[in-house]
Image (cartoon, grey):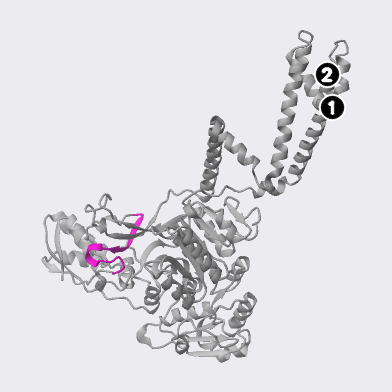
Amino acid sequence: MTTTASPESGSNHHDGFLICGLGSLGQHCALNLKTFGVPVFAIDIVAPDQWESPQLPGLIDRLILGDCRSAEVMQQAGIDQCRAVLLATQEERVNLEAALTARVLNPRVRLVMRSGKQNLNDLMEQQLQNFVAFEPTQLAAPAFALEAFGEKLLGYFQIGELRFQVLRQRIEANHPWCDRRRLFELETGHRRILRHLSWEASGTADTPQNAGFSPSAQLYTWLPDTQLGQGDELVTVDYDPQLQTVARRVARRSRQSWLSRWNEGWAKWKHWPSLKQSLVNLWQANYEQQIRRVALLCGVTVVVLFLMGTLLLKATALTAISFRESFFYTFILLFGGYGDVFEELQNYRYPALIQTFSALITIAGTAFIGVLYALLTEKLLTLKFEFNQRRPPVPEKDHVIVVWLGRVGRRVLKLLQDLDQPVLGIAEKSLDADVLPHVPLLTGDILASLEKANLSTAKSLVAVSDDEIQNLEIGLMAHRVNPHCRTIIRTYDQQFTDRVAKIFPFAQVLCASAISAEAFAGAAFGEHVIGLFRLYHQMALVTQYEIEAGDTLSGLLLSEVAYGYGVVPIWHQRPGTPGTAMPSEDQQLHPGDRLVVIATIRGLRRVEQGQRAKPTWRVQVDRALTPDSLFEGASEIARIVGCKLGDAREFMAFLPGVLPFPLYRHQAERLVRLLNRVQVRAIILD
């Protein structure tokens, strides 16, 4: 992470943030940056017609009208005083040129660029230091996917080879944790608690309890010794090292799909009414499938002629030829071999009627088999197009419908597919064969496609087109057809978002710019945002820190980072060693370490500004029950508190006493539990 001046040291000369482009994304970036209390400058070609917030014009410290690619305009905006430049215009070329201009004018400035060209972004990050590029649609897609998945799964992201999930669950009376487990018992090597809400205590699932000892309004607002009761709500972050790879899950789903189709087909053949109905449906197919009628009619005619010819040839020569010979003679007749057959059978006297019928078989067989050849040739000519475009059928129920498959829609489908969620995509035009090949797809008119999408039994609908009015229309139609279907609507204007959410409370209305802006703001301070998710109407960011000497995290225990800044460490890695998921809070951070935390934007601001809450809780140690517990108790104190082992032993030699090291509430409760476990009696002082 970037080294910052302490709050006591005064304002740094290079502490401004310059935003190029005051569209929806740029304005939301400004709002988020102002929560950090930093100067915000802006450049736009014209003054914005509409502001995302009425207070925003007064929050921008300096607004320059002009071309952000101009060196003169950037200098006028104060590029020399800036720590970071956020390039948020809608033109990727403009963003790139402005980024190069900013780097020439200020070689140390951090660049955060909006760009959808992933290959170019990777190359730029390799060539330029202190540079990061995002595509806002890619940042917003997980939020849409998670809203569609349901209320239980709040977050989904990956660190290395591990997949992490943020889960919300309501504790019912039959839950194995209900009235049996305390919160600290649930924190294991693969799980951390993000939020606990007591329904009985608050009366509502949105009111945080016991927030007075936590610097965060969202995290660590729970007490470790609290016992889970009926109606409580719990949010945890979990990882499973045994999760299957995406490729394996897709292959498994494909095998299951083929097996289910085979079983369904066999069941229909065994059951005559089902088979009859299938044949009727095939015959009554629409115009596009009439080629099947022709093929079916030709095939049935050829088979009937074949059987009749075999039986008649055998009936007129009871002992002259066998059934096998009459079978092959009829086969030859069907393929135009009339002369060959009767030249072979010239010693037998067949009635003229049989010879006439044989000629009819030859003519009909030649005609119908010619038709079958033509159909087969046509099929072979189009096989390379149809084979690759063959997709699974439309799911029957509990599926998620994604309308409009642009970059956001495709990303949403990919994420949902990774989560083993049945999905269906709807687009105006067909996708290339290699784009989401295992996803069912309906193309053509959007409203007509919705009628074929089994909307009445769908789990969720996600409308992510570029037209927010169209998204609203689709969402309202989905709610009319299926009131139980979760409706997620993509919007671009915050005021429009607020109005729609207020008037239509059944819809989940997400402003893509507002979601992405928090990641841009976090990245402007030098942090790497891995993912984000919504936690009780507030964005939580999964952020990676590279610890540097002298910054606000170096030298701290993870417990001090967690409880002092109100963030949740979920990954820690020392240089040259494998990383550890859900690391112990007794680990100390050193320069070169890599740390991944879950935090709100305010938590990132506290880390950035070094505003760590002070520990205020005291632990009183009364006595040690055995001589061995003196040594073990001193070891626990040194490990939890982070003091020297000699100082802890000296304290244990003069019991009873109050630890001279103030602790955070969660830290103090953990120390008391561990001391009691090694037969050292201790309590927390109020």
Image position of 397 with respect to 402: above or below: above
Q: State the residue position of label 1.
A: 336
Left or right: residue 361 versus residue 578 is right
Q: Nearer the viewer, residue 517 or 614?
A: 517
- Residue 470 point in image, percent of width and height: 56, 68
Left or right: residue 223 versus residue 301 is left
**Mark 2 crowdedness (10 Å alpha carbons): few <14, some 14-19, many ≥20:** few
Residue 202 falls within the magenta-colored stretch: yes
Image position of 189 with respect to 24: above or below: above
Amino acid type shown at disc 2: Leu
Q: Residue furthest front?
A: 353
Q: Which residues are magenta?
A: 189-207
Q: Residue furthest top?
A: 319
Q: State the residue position of label 2.
A: 353
Left or right: residue 42 versus residue 325 is left
**Can residue 578 be seen in the rendering of this structure?**
no
Q: Secondary structure at mark 1?
A: loop
Q: Earlier in the sequence, mark 1 or mark 2?
A: 1
Image position of 31 with respect to 369: above or below: below
Q: Residue at left 72%, top 45%?
A: 383
Residue 416 falls within the magenta-colored stretch: no
Q: Quadrant of the N terminus?
A: bottom left
